[in-house]
Structure formats: structure tokens, C-alpha cells
Image (cartoon, rainbow, N blue to C red):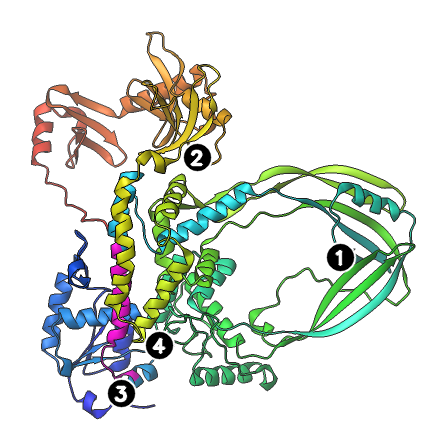
Amino acid sequence: MAEIKAEYRSKKSLVIVESPAKAKTIEKYLGKGFEVKSSIGHIRDLKKSEMSIDIDNNFEPQYEVSRGKGKTVTELKRLAKAVDIVWLATDEDREGEAIAWHLYEALKLKPEATKRITFAEITKTALIQAINNPRSIDKHLVDAQQARRVLDRLVGYELSPVLWKKIRYGLSAGRVQSVAVRLIVEREREIEAFQPIPSYKITAEFQVDGDTVLKTQRPDKFKTYNETKEFIESVIGKEYIVAALEKKPGKRSPGAPFTTSKLQQEASAKLGYSVKQTMTLAQKLYENGLITYMRTDSTNLSDQARADAKKTIEDNYGIEYHKERNFKSKSANAQEAHEAIRPTDFSRLTAGIGDGSLESLYRLIRNKALASQMADAKIEKTVIKIDISGTQEQLQATGEVVTFPGFLTVMGMKDNDSQLLPELTLGQKLDLNQMLATETFSKNPARYTEATLVRTLEEKGIGRPSTYSPTISTIQDRGYVVKEDRPGIEREYKIISTDGRAIQEKIEKETFGAEKSKLFPTDTAGVVTDFLIQYFPDVIDYNFTANVEEAFDKIASGEKEWHKMIADFYKDFHPKVEDSENISRQETLKQRLLGNDPKTGRPVFARFGRFGPMIMLGDNEVDKDVQFASIPKNLHIDTIKLEDALPLLELPRIVGETPDGKKIKANRGRFGPYVQLDKTYVSIKEEELYGITYEEAYARIKNKIEEKAKALIHDFEEHKLKVLNGRFGPYITNGKKNVKLPKGLVPEDLTADECLKIFKEAPAKKGRGRKK
């Protein structure tokens, strides 16, 4: 194995990486003379409290040391002064290059004593090779990352306030996030507009020698019930004869090793991982030196990796199982020339970390990369065609047999509809067991999962491997999209069957449309998307967003100057922001007339308000006593009907009166439906909102009041203090601050003065710090 050059071995070195876990792994390999420290991610960024871009000074960004990173910077400065060389070993993508540059600037490093190194894997060989071949910071890559950060800040800081004024305070817009939301909104509207088309699938089972059953089907479906029934009637008493037996050799080839997006998709499909979970686990595998860098859009494997894969395949499976392959990335805008994601050691079967999730992801990555260098699987496909006497109709059966498994030895045999076919001869007559005509329905477009959204973003050239996961997290965190399961809907379908002698018809029921971990847009997403499409079409245009990514690529390769790229964007964007002052808020909310209230004759609208989607009774430009009701989560502003809206306007509902004349109300609040008596609130289920009886509501409220009374030990009204029994023992409270009782005290024996003294002397609670 190569050694570190003597000129570097003899000097004291500080290696700076991004994560503490990565630092530990690297220090183990480099040994004496090399101290490895972590910057714990970014150390500088644009100021949070302001735009931090000097628009008049060529869009120059204004950076500051990130909150909480002051100690890290001070410590790294101290360490850097005590060594001969500082090695900036941050990740090899644009973001990593930018972090290296920020470290160089913030630590005030000297160019002659600073080296930039990158490596695609954390192994001793890769690290020594990197140390022996350092380079300087690539300013083109840094500029590409600066351009992305500046452009996203301009869009976010100028466009978000427009949404606050015109739609609702607290909303946000982003160059990539708003496009991702648009995709989900448009898919949801496609689904809502979709009308399923029925058709009839013909299947038939034949008895062949004893217990063997041959399953067949008609290649094409019938479109109508009448032609289907006519066909079933036409086969009564017919003979079924084997007309053709065709055997064709075929093959299956392995796919390329994983890119970031393909790993996210397959981990979702096979392991059920979210995009964020996949990237967190992959990061751990990388930092422990088990896989190559996990943010890549390349499908290449290095010469050494292909050689290692060949040895593992030939040692474990035989020479006939190996086939060297070079894959070319399908992405026209593939970023830097990284490798695909692969194991650092193909002979290693497991991660060996002792975590089931990590092990599963490691095996997925290893098997995919290893299979990419294996021979094709050979299959034999058999097609049987069966004539129906006296007609031009044919039924068909297909089956596959794997004659040489090749790469399937590693990837596993995939389940499919293929069956093991019985031995038959041409002209052989078959006995019909049953023929079924089953009504089926065309399927609506599929809702996005996190993984299929990533695939679509990649196909459209929106974002890059490092942006997929944060984008998907952002649109959920901001309340534009929810990821959830939803139950299916029951529907009826028709079946016509025959045993060759008589016909039977029946109607069955099925549940369809159940969703698991799918992305659903909120009403807010729909209103914001419509607003952006109308007034800021460029920002939310798919091609524009992809073209911006291409511009970043050109900056990274030195073909484009980043200040000019930003200036060209801003001269078109900013005037639209200024013009937005003239957009009326009423125009953006797009209230929809549902019909008229049968009791009052007044119009009923669905609209978006400052607190979200709502129903409005009356016209607020004409009527003074307009009534509002919020729309619950199970209904949507685009699809709600008058019959759904009218009950919402009846809230709060008077459930009944107590013997002393107090009203019990049922209503819906920000935490869901509830019943209320005075200041006592009890949560109820959505379906109980309009049906809960006075007796049931009163019983639940009474029960809660009794539970509260049991918790009350003392009520010292003059001091506005109470002593209560809580989950963690007795405590004193004034309604805002809680103080736990010191040990050894009997709460029942306490006086008002003693409680006041304990309360005043209690130390102030330590703050938890600002949430990120």
C-alpha cells in the first residue's frame, strides 16, 4: 500500500472535516502527526435577520459566523495556528467546496499552508491518495453554490412577504420547494377530475391431467357489458384446443449502481424508508467507511471498483457469473464526476454495525453495485395459445423459466404473474373449469410518494442530489403537504361466469384507492400555487427551474459568471414583486360560490382566509352580519359541496341545557371537535360533532370536572396559587409557572404562606435554547 509522502509526514497537520463521526474514522487511518477535527457542518451563512445580499454592489453576499458556531471557529483557529498544514477535507460536492472556502475565509488561513483534498470513500487507500494529491479550492464550484444560495435567498425574502400580504401571514415560497408543491397540487387535481372507465377482463381455467390447472386470459379487454355478455354466451358448449406452443429464449440485464435518487426510490419501495431516513442512514455508512459518497448523480464505477467486484463475483459464484459493464448517466446535467454509490469493500457482506436499518440499506447498496458487474440472467419464455372452436377468439397463457440466474443470484428472483406451465401438445383438447368476465376500472394517476416525487424532480432536471431530501422535508414542515395514510372507498363490480354449460351473474364489492404514505397537498398549497402561476409564472415554471440548474452547472465549470446570472434573473423578477402591490387580496383568495342557504337565501362561499380555508355565509361586500366557519381537514376548498358546507355553519351546536340553565355546546376548534360547558372542554370524535347527545356530553364533562377536583389539593385564591396532583407528583402553580414540591413535605399540610415562600424561592427554569 502507498504511503503518505515524506514532505507531509514530517509536518504537523490539522485535517478539518464536516462531521464528528467522519473525523473519528479518518483519524484512525491517518495516524500520528494528523489531528482531525470537525466543523460540524456549515460555520458561515447569510445573516438570518436580513436579506444579507448587497443588491447595489453586484449582489455581493454578506456572511456571518452561524449561530452557535463561535466556539467551533475559535477552537479551529487556535488549532490551525499550531500546525504546519491545514487540510480542508469537506465533502467533494459543491456544498462541501463552499464549506471549505468558508473555513478558509473565517479561519483566515494562509494559502501556502492550506491544502484542499477530496475523497469518494473513507478508506486508508483513498485518504493517502488524497493527501498525496492535494489541490486548491475550486472557486468555480464555490461560486455555483453561492449563486444557488443567493438566488434562493432573493426568491424567499422577496416573494414570501408578498404571500403574507395577499394570502396569509407566515407562508413561504422557494425556487425549488414551490415547484415541488406545484407538482403535488396538479397531480391531486388530475385525480379529482379523473373518471374511472370500466372494462371487462376475461380469464379462464382449464383442467390438465389430474390436479394441474392452466390459467389463461384473453389478451384484450371488452369495453362494454353487452359485448362481454355476448362473448360469454358464445362460448357455451365450445371446444378448447391447444393451437400454438412457442418457446423463446430471453434475458434480463442488471441495472446500474445507485445514484442518490435511485437509492431513495428503491429504499422506499423495498425497505419502506422515507427519503430523509435513507439519507441519514447512508451518511452513517459513508462516515464509517463502508460506502462511497452518497450524494451523486453518476452511475460510474472506478477501474479499481470494477476489479474488486470481479474478484468477489468469481470467488463466490464462478467466472461465468461475471460481466464487466460501464454505465453512462442518463442525466444530461449530471454534476461532478463522482462514482455511483457502492461499498468500499465488495467482499464485505454486512455493515457490521449492529443496526438493522443500516444493515438493510448496506445490503441493498452492495447487492445493486455487485449485480451491475454480473452476467445476464437467461430465461425461457413459453406462450400457449388456445383456440375456441367456431370463433376467431384465442386465449393465452405465458410462463417463464430461469435457465441461468446470473445477477439474479444476488438481486433475488422477482415475483411476477408468470406461472409454471404444464406439458401440452399441439391439438390437445382442454376441459374448461371456469371462465370469468370481471369488471375492472381504469386507475387514476398515482399520488406521489416521497420517492416518486424525487424521481419526477430528477426527470425534470429540478434540484440536485443534495437538494431532494431537504426540499421534501421543507414542503411538509411548512404545511403545504402532508404525508399520510387514507382508507379506501367501497364500490361494486360485476362478474359473469360460465362452466361451459350455463351462465351466472353476480355483483361483488371491493375496496379501492387506499393510500399509504402518500403526499397530499393542503388547501394552502392550492391557493399559493394558483397565485404563483398567475403572478410569478417564471419562478414556478418547470423549464425555468431546470434552466437555472443548468446555469449553476455552467458556473461550476467556469463557463458562466455568477453575478451576471443573478443580475439577469433579478431584473425580470424584482419588478413583478413591486407590481404585486397592485394585486387585490380578494382577487387572490378566489372565493367559490357553492349555492344559496335554503333557510336565508343568502349565498354560501368556499374561500381562503387569514386562518385557512373557510365557509362564508353572505357576501361581505354587501352584508354586515357575515357568518364564517372553518373547513375541517377531511374536506377541501376546491371540492366541498353545499350539502357539506351547511352543517359547518350550524356550529357551535347547542347540545342541551344543564338543570341550572347553562348551555353545553359542540364545536370545532384548532385541536379538533369538542364539547364545552363554561370553561371545561372535552375532545370528541369528528363523527360525534353533530350526533352526540346531551346525556353523553354531560357525562363526559362531569367526569372531567371530577378528575380535576381530585387533582386539586389546595386553592389559595388570595395568592392566586393552587396545589395540584400531577403526573409527576404534587406541585404549586399560578397558571403560568409550575413549581415541584420539595421532598419530605406533605402537600395537604401546607399553608398559603408556605406555598408562597416555596413558589418565590424556586429557581428560574433554564431556557431550552432557540429551536432551529
Q: Which of marks 2 and 4 is in front?
A: 2
Q: Upstream in the sequence, badge 4 or badge 3? A: 4
Cα distance, mark 4 to mark 3?
15 Å
Q: Specify the farthest residue to the bottom.
A: 6
Whether residue 277 appears in this view of the structure is no
Question: What residue appears at the point 27 percent right and 52 percent down from the top-left corner?
Answer: 156
Cα distance, mark 1 to mark 3?
64 Å
Cα distance, mark 3 to mark 2?
62 Å
Q: Mark 4 points at which residue?
A: 120
Residue 752, position in %: x, y? 10, 23
Q: Give the range drawn in magenta.
A: 130-154
Q: What residue type is labelled 3?
A: Asn
Q: What residue type is labelled 2?
A: Ile
Q: Upstream in the sequence, badge 2 or badge 4? A: 4
Identify the secondary structure beneath mark 3: helix
Badge 2 density bin: few <14, some 14–19, many ≥20, Cα 10 Å: many
Identify the secondary structure beneath mark 1: loop
Cα distance, mark 2 to mark 4?
49 Å
Question: What residue appears at the point 26 percent right and 57 percent down from the top-left corner?
Answer: 571
Q: Name the residue under label 2.
A: 637
* 762 left or right, relative to 405: left
Badge 4 density bin: few <14, some 14–19, many ≥20, Cα 10 Å: many
Residue 132's disc number: 3
Q: Name the residue under label 1.
A: 219
Q: What residue type is labelled 1?
A: Pro
